[in-house]
Amino acid sequence: MPSIYMANAIQAALAEAMAEDPSVIVLGEDVELSTIGATKGLIDKFGANRVRNSPISEATVVGSCVGAAACGLRPVMDLMFSSFLYIALDQVANQAARLRYMSGGQVSLPLVLFAGTGPSGSAAAQHSENPHPLLMSLSGVKVVFPSTPADAKGLLLASIRDPDPVVFLLDLMLAGSRGEVPDGAEAIPLGEGVIRRPGTDLTVVAIGSAVPQALTAATELAHAGVSAEVIDPRTLVPCDWPLIFDSVRRTGRLVIADPARRTCGAAAEIAARAMESCWSSLRTAPVRVSWEDVPIPFSPVLEQAVTVSSAKIRAAAAAMLGAS
Amino acid sequence: MNSDVFAQLTAGYDGVSPARRNLALFARMALIRSFERKLQELFSRGRLPGFVHLYVGEEAIAVGACSVLGGGDKITSTHRGHGHLIAKGADPRRMMAEIMGRTTGLCHGKGGSMHIADYSLGILGANGIVGGGIPIATGSALADRVLGRDQVTVCFFGDGAANQGVLLEALNLSAIWQLPVVFICENNGFTEWMRTSDITAGSIAERARPFGVQSATVDGNDVLAVQAAVAEAVGRARGGGGPALIEAQTYRMLAHNEGEEAFSGQYRPKEEIEHWRGLDPIDRFAAVLAEDPDIGAKELEDIREAAARKIEAAVEYAVASPEPEPADALTDLYARAGA
């Protein structure tokens, strides 16, 4: 099984999806050249009709994906940075997420908005966003947030084949990571999380780049005699709530490592649902390891100060065990 | 006129003799007028939930434009969209039911007046966001282009939407990709309660020029003029000649939304409204048709009455239709719900 980079896994999924279905097209800024390599070479394989460099007009290009999806295409748009999703927010929130429901289920919108996401090292506040909490609250778009190359490939295949709008977020902190990816087009169903590391003392639900951070923390905690279970939901809409609740009921303790601001983050929703569903099993209050409630700052020192790290996850877990 | 004859007149334009074709345009305009007048009455009697934006005085644009479209062609519409939908063939009964929030409505009561759609007829939806349909129409045309289909998309939008950035983005995108889309701006003089000329620089039609997009200005109260202009643009787009922008100049005879008098005051002179009443697109076309010895005033009056009866029947259908169950609010969000 070959070990490949995240971007190569994305590229492989796109190439397989385009080969199996002529209605799949790829468009976006610089998709011919491809800055991170995710769409590299597709123009040579599939031609200019299906691989289209688009102007920097996020609202209209995202909206065009909505219209094209309503009329027989399966567009995959590369937004480059998820911060740019906000430029197109009308088309995401008022159109893509609404047209099926508002029309009484008349139309399906099979489109994928693909974006690099999160802090990538001093990209500062307008290139470091993680919009998944906002997207989760919209109702009407699915949200995929993988943490390994194998999941990225399998989930992108599933996203492209899915009949609904999907925002596919590729954590830029993981862009340089490698992992084993099986050959062939094995799609991973949306809504199935995975236990990355089994444990008995506490549950750590981690998202995106927080997954490898949580695994590092779990290894260190094990040296201290603490058995941490690490759960990667992989997709946030739909979310594998049974997997999370089952783990919390077994361990009685919950830490959520979420690369997003604390207020109304994914961690807030996960904590609330766990308390509603697993209250009698919880031995102590769930704890969020999230970003501080500020924009992502430029200075490496400041960026580190406000974002999630394995040290912060470990500290939260250790404190919880000491306190309970 | 019996209802079968009227139904024939409003069934479509294919294979209809030239004289009957003009009658069909007239009948479709009369149907829209009756629909809107009935909604005005229902609203004033407190019978309609939500916002209603009426199309009275602008019927010639939707009818003229849609008369040159085929079944596979698509439209996007606006918050003032009832006319576009009827012109493209939507069933007034199911539209009325939608506006009344009933399960038999085209969107099962989930959309309402501002969001009615009938995708089976290529009606990609009215849209409550000003300019919201512009990117969607562009994408619809992209799908036709990529898939090599011989179809076009007409994008109706208002003068207010002409000041949304997406119009300029869409002109650029559709020009570089030579997409088969015709943008039709219905300039009715008012952006909500603001006079459009006060908040809009230059000419809307001229905004196409720097993009190399063909444009035209047309009398929006002259159904044959609209038809001719749109036919030219649609024919060019269908043949691979790329997009076009048409500014149809008209006047909003009624409120921005029904009930505005509660706060709007008299924001335009009565003389101005009277002037435009004299340019009413249906009366004007009736005057032209009445000159035709094969038609005559009596037949036109019969058509108007048949249209009114059809709308009465639509109201009866809607009123007799059930309200949704509360649990219906939780359906239709996703095509595949997942875990």
Image: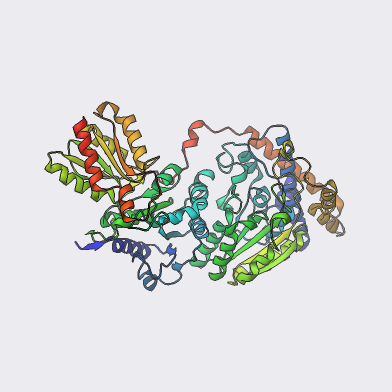
The extreme top residue here reads A280
> Of A26 and B130, which appears nearest the observer?
B130
**Looking at the rendering, in which quadrant would you find the C terminus of chain B?**
top left
A117 w.r.t. B336: above or below: below
> Of B168 and B321, which appears nearest the observer?
B168
- Percent across and percent down for residue B63 are 71, 56
- Percent across and percent down for residue A91 are 51, 52
Residue B246, can we see it?
A: yes
Q: Indicate how the structure is coloured in the image.
A: rainbow
Q: On the picture, is A315 further left or further right than B275?
A: left
The extreme bottom residue here reads A44
The quadrant where residue B216 appears: bottom right
Q: Residue at x 53, y 44 (%)?
A: A102
- Percent across and percent down for residue B289 are 83, 57
B242 w.r.t. A199: above or below: below
- Percent across and percent down for residue B40 are 73, 39
Q: On the picture, is A106 further left or further right than A128?
A: right
Q: Residue at x 79, y 44 (%)?
A: B305
Q: On the picture, is A43 further left or further right than B301?
A: left
Residue A230, can we see it?
A: no
